[in-house]
Image (tube, rainbow, N blue to C red):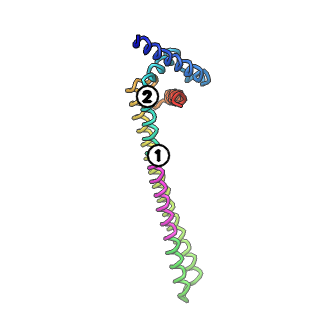
Amino acid sequence: YNEYKSYLSFMEKKDEYIQKISQQNALAPSDILLSEVEVERLADSLLDGTVFGIITELKDIQSIEFNKLSKDRKALVQTYQAKTKALEKQQREEYDRKIEEDTFLLKDEDALNKQHRLQMLKLLKDKEEKLHDFDMKIVQKCDDQARDQQQYLQYAGIPGFVISDVPLTIRKQIHILTLIDSLSE
């Protein structure tokens, strides 16, 4: 009797998931809609609750990595702000020293200003290159993390999850995660 009662509870939970998933799925764009089979497979994968825990863990990992990368990028920007201020100070001091020398002519001032502009442009170019390289590193880490998550969710048996960089597949996977997320609330 207890097994039968447990089975009924299990089936009621599955029916509830199917109903909720189907309702929300109907609101999605047609190119990412889940089929009835996919809805049922998704409901089956959620029944023991493990998937909710996995997704929470993946969100936490992603959040930690995002915060670390944001902090590292901010530190890089601050480093270049400090370098810019130091260069400006050095240039001001050099200019002031030249002014104190009575032999500082207008042509010398023009040459010094040109030299200072070139130094600043070089620093700004270096900053742009470093930020670009860092941003490319961020993109690569995000891509790697997305592939790891896809693989993990595929192993967890969630339908629709395969390692892919095809935009439509990724949109459908995001739709699936949104559906799961709405059921975990």
Q: Main secondary structure of the magenta part?
A: helix
The location of residue 74, given as percent across then percent down, is 49, 56
Identify the amino acid type marked 1.
Answer: Phe
- Identify the image quadrant of the N terminus: top left
Identify the amino acid type marked 2.
Answer: Val
Q: Which residues are magenta?
A: 67-86
| 94 or 108, nearer to the observer | 94
- Judging by the rendered image, the residue that carries numbered circle 2 is 51
Q: Secondary structure at mark 2?
A: helix
Is 89 above or below relative to 159? Answer: below
| 4 or 30, nearer to the observer | 4
Q: Residue 66, labelled with which disc?
A: 1
Q: Secondary structure at mark 1?
A: helix
Identified at 53% across, 27% down, the residue is 183
Q: CA distance from mark 1 to mark 2?
A: 22 Å
Q: Residues within 10 Å of mark 1 (few under 14, many from 20)?
A: some
Q: Determine which quarter of the picture holds residue 117.
A: bottom right
Is 69 above or below relative to 58? Answer: below
